[in-house]
């Protein structure tokens, strides 16, 4: 009879561990290499996809990225400063903005310039409640319905539009401005090379400009002015959404309150200045100066003059601007060594550096930006006779009618500029007088509320300052100063402090090298030969040594 | 895992392959750097240098990974690995980290060339350069993970290298050809798949955490798939 086999039990052998359900599952063959394995792989990959998509969406919404381009005080190319955000949000109760790109998002980001503009606009959209980004198809006529001006937008156009707070998406905007990617960059005037990105400032002033009240702008005619639709100044006002009209002061009246009168490149003087001649239907023909004075005083209007007082005799016009504290040297143009041309007459202007100057905040101060003033007459403060303009402080004075004015230079020549027959070495090229109007002014008590307002007189001694070629250039800040002035003029508060003054130009990386051929050759040997040679020698040594093992 | 990592690193430096990789990479890197920046002077372009270095990595990195598993399979030492008291995950990760250490060390050595630029430039912002270096390190990791996965599928080193290059070139072609596709959603999907679309953020000076997760996920997925391949082989 066969004996049953005894089971041998090894003493002290550890008892078999009981496996958990999970361990049982993972130890099965089908889990390791069968159908379950395939399913597991698919699930894991799907999970990874879902996690990435979700994280990507959250990262886009909450901007989970670090801007490593911080310069100076830490603000990078893609970061918006707090004062700018505050300035834009100040109008959130009444205005909703859209920054509209005329291409799809990925195409905008793929563009070398567009990516900077997009990130800047995205930063605005993230930080402000009343601004959104939108993408339109430039080829779709319905999309472009509201935004055609003199030409259709292109794929590199950026439209900044303002709507009423409660307007529906797709409604017609109250006002808009078209920019191009180029508008956001500043280039060197001599080389044409783009060296800085100015997106924060450009978008901020555009947004603020759209929200402010637009005054009526009158361009005078009849004195040889350049007021056609090709005129850069005319287009500037149009682009900014102003109501522009051309006025013949020998016939027409200036009726708009707080409007702006522009005298651009006159070749003949305005009509004789007679302040007491009145015909049955108002001031008679020829009394243009009288009409202007009435407009400035009673309608609280502003005036902008771009004139060549050296080449053309304009004594009546000089009289008008002298009433606003600005005098003109007519014996010759300002000549400065800091000039774009060898003759010294295309001056690269300086900005006032005194923070008390009323025009200080019209532009961010930066050594790298240029404003060019060609063939300019020097200006001085006529309210104080014999006073030359050397300092950049405001000068406050009171006229015979009791009005308080503040006159200050906006653009200055260099320290060694000269005018024939004048001893002083620095001259104002553009000046501005701010006139305070108080509620209780005589003659207009029925028209004004109890709010103190301001009007402006701006005189540029160069008739060429506002020419199209300079206003449309990305090299110079000629257009920006004027646009910011318009913003200040149209601001209800009458304050110049509504611009984000702390925005600095953000310099782009300059990859060019100042290196001689000899130096390049020497470094090439180091880069190409030395390190690889060391690695090769080590390899050979190791190979030879191990060959014998 | 540490033992396998050390073994792999020793293998790179006790055989010619490691030195050949270092020498070739540094030489090509040096040539690109010199001819796109130093010798261009006023027209120097660091951006172009990093973009072309990407192409170099597509061609050279497969050399590091081609023998990761192919050689083991060919020499029939694969069984030793599969039966070793080491988890497959640890083994795969160790090989990946060894290859990555080789690549990252060599690449960072090559980045020493960049120290020449501040001596001769007017204003060279560090952010785009740092961003580009980070992006290439992340891309290198993804390339190596793909290479290791492909290496696990074949026993021929040459086939492994060529297949890896083909996959990387396909991803590159998707990135380059994407802009010519007119349908937005197709472009968006392909851009999402493409490894290279996120490079632009880093080279613009933006450290994007979503992109970091993306590259880490790419590495994870391909290493995971490599482990699955070996799991199947071990237990089949």
Image (cartoon, coloured by chain):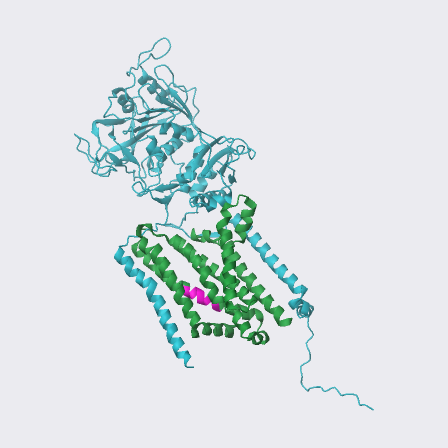
What is the span of residues highlighted in magenta in the rendered image? B98-106
Q: For chain A, what colour was chosen?
A: cyan
Residue A409 location (% of width, % of height): 29, 33
Q: Nearer the viewer, residue A120 or A502?
A: A120
- Residue B209 appears in view: no
Residue A18 location (% of width, % of height): 69, 74
Residue A158 is left or right of residue A55, and the answer is: left
In the image, what residue occupies the spot 34% across and 44% down? Answer: A193
Residue A485 location (% of width, % of height): 37, 32
- Residue, far bottom: A1
Q: Quadrant of the C terminus of chain A?
A: bottom left
Residue A323 falls within the magenta-colored stretch:
no
Query: Where is A104 relative to A454, above or below?
Result: below
Quadrant hosting residue A385: top left
Q: Nearer the viewer, residue A262 or A490?
A: A262
Quadrant hosting residue A246: top left
- Residue, far right: A1
Query: Where is A474 relative to B48, above or below?
Result: above
Query: Where is A362 relative to B79, above or below?
Result: above
- Residue, far top: A280
Q: How many marks?
A: 0
Q: Nearer the viewer, residue A507 or A442?
A: A507
- Residue B180 appears in view: yes
Residue B11 location (% of width, % of height): 46, 74
Q: For chain B, what colour was chosen?
A: green
Q: Main secondary structure of the magenta part?
A: helix
Q: Quadrant of the N terminus of chain A?
A: bottom right
């Amino acid at each position: 009879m066969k004996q049953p086999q005894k089971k041998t039990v090894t003493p002290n052998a550890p008892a078999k561990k009981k496996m958990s359900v999970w361990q049982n599952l993972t130890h099965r063959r089908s889990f390791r290499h069968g159908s379950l394995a395939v399913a597991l792989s698919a699930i894991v990959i799907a999970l990874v996809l879902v996690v990435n998509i979700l994280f990507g969406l959250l990262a886009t919404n909450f901007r989970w990225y670090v801007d490593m381009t911080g310069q100076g005080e830490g603000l990078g190319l893609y970061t918006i400063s707090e004062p700018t955000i505050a300035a834009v949000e100040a109008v959130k109760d009444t205005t909703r903005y859209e920054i509209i790109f005329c291409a799809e998002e990925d195409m905008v980001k793929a563009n070398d310039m567009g990516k900077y503009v997009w990130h800047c606009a995205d930063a605005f959209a993230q930080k402000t409640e009343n601004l959104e980004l939108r993408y339109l198809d430039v080829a779709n006529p319905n999309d472009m319905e509201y935004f055609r001006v003199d030409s259709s937008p292109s794929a590199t156009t950026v439209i900044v539009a303002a709507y009423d707070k409660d307007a529906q998406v797709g409604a017609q905007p109250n006002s808009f401005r078209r920019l191009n990617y180029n508008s956001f960059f500043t280039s060197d005037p001599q080389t044409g090379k783009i060296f800085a990105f100015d997106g924060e400032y450009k978008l901020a002033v555009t947004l603020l400009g759209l929200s402010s009240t637009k005054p009526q702008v009158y361009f005078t005619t009849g004195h040889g002015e350049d007021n056609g639709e090709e005129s850069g100044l005319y287009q500037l006002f149009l682009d900014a959404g102003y109501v522009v009209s051309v006025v013949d002061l020998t016939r027409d009246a200036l009726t708009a309150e707080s409007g702006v009168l522009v005298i651009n490149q006159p070749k003949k003087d305005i009509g004789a200045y007679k302040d007491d001649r009145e015909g049955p239907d108002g001031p008679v023909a020829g009394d243009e100066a009288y009409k202007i004075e009435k407009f400035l005083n009673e309608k609280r209007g502003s005036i902008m003059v771009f004139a060549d007082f050296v080449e053309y005799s304009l004594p009546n016009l000089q009289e008008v601007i002298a009433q606003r504290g600005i005098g003109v040297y007519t014996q010759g143009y300002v000549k400065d060594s800091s000039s774009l041309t060898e003759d010294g007459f295309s001056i690269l202007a300086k900005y006032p550096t005194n923070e008390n100057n009323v025009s200080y905040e019209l532009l961010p101060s930066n050594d790298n930006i240029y404003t060019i003033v060609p063939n300019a007459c020097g200006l001085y403060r006529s309210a104080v006779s014999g006073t030359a303009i050397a300092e950049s402080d405001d000068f406050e004075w009171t006229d015979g009618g009791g009005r308080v004015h503040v006159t200050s230079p906006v653009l200055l020549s260099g320290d060694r500029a000269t005018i024939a027959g004048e001893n002083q070495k620095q001259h104002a090229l553009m000046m501005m007088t701010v006139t305070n109007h108080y509620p209780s002014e005589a003659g207009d008590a029925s028209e004004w509320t109890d709010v103190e307002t301001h009007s402006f007189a701006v005189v540029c001694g160069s008739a060429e300052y506002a020419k199209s070629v300079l206003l449309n250039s990305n090299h110079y800040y000629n257009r920006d100063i004027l646009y910011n002035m318009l913003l200040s003029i149209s601001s209800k508060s009458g304050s110049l402090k509504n611009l984000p003054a702390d925005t600095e130009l953000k310099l782009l990386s300059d990859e060019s090298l100042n290196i001689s051929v000899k130096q390049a050759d020497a470094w090439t040997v180091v880069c190409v030969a030395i390190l690889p040679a060391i690695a090769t020698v080590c390899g050979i040594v190791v190979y030879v040594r191990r060959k014998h093992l | 895992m540490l033992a396998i990592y050390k073994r792999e690193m020793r293998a790179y430096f006790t055989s010619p392959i490691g030195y050949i990789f270092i020498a070739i990479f540094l030489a090509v890197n040096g040539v690109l750097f010199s001819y796109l920046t130093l010798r261009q002077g006023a027209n120097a372009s660091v951006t172009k240098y990093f973009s072309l270095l990407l192409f170099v990595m597509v061609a050279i990195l497969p050399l590091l990974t081609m023998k990761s598993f192919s050689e083991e399979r060919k020499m029939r030492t694969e069984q030793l690995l599969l039966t070793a008291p080491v988890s497959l995950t640890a083994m795969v990760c160790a090989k990946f980290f060894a290859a990555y250490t080789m690549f990252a060390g060599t690449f960072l050595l090559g980045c020493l060339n960049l120290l020449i630029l501040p001596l001769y430039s007017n204003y060279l912002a560090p952010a785009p350069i740092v961003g580009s270096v980070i992006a290439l390190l992340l891309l290198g990791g993804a390339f190596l993970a793909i290479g290791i996965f492909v290496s696990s599928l074949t026993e021929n080193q040459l086939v492994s290298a060529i297949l890896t290059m083909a996959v990387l070139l396909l991803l590159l072609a998707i990135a380059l050809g994407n802009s010519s596709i007119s349908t937005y959603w197709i472009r968006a999907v392909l851009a999402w798949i493409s490894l290279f679309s996120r490079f632009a953020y880093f080279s613009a000076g933006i450290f994007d955490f979503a992109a970091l997760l993306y590259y880490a996920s790419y590495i994870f997925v391909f290493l995971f798939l490599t482990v699955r391949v070996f799991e199947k082989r071990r237990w089949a």
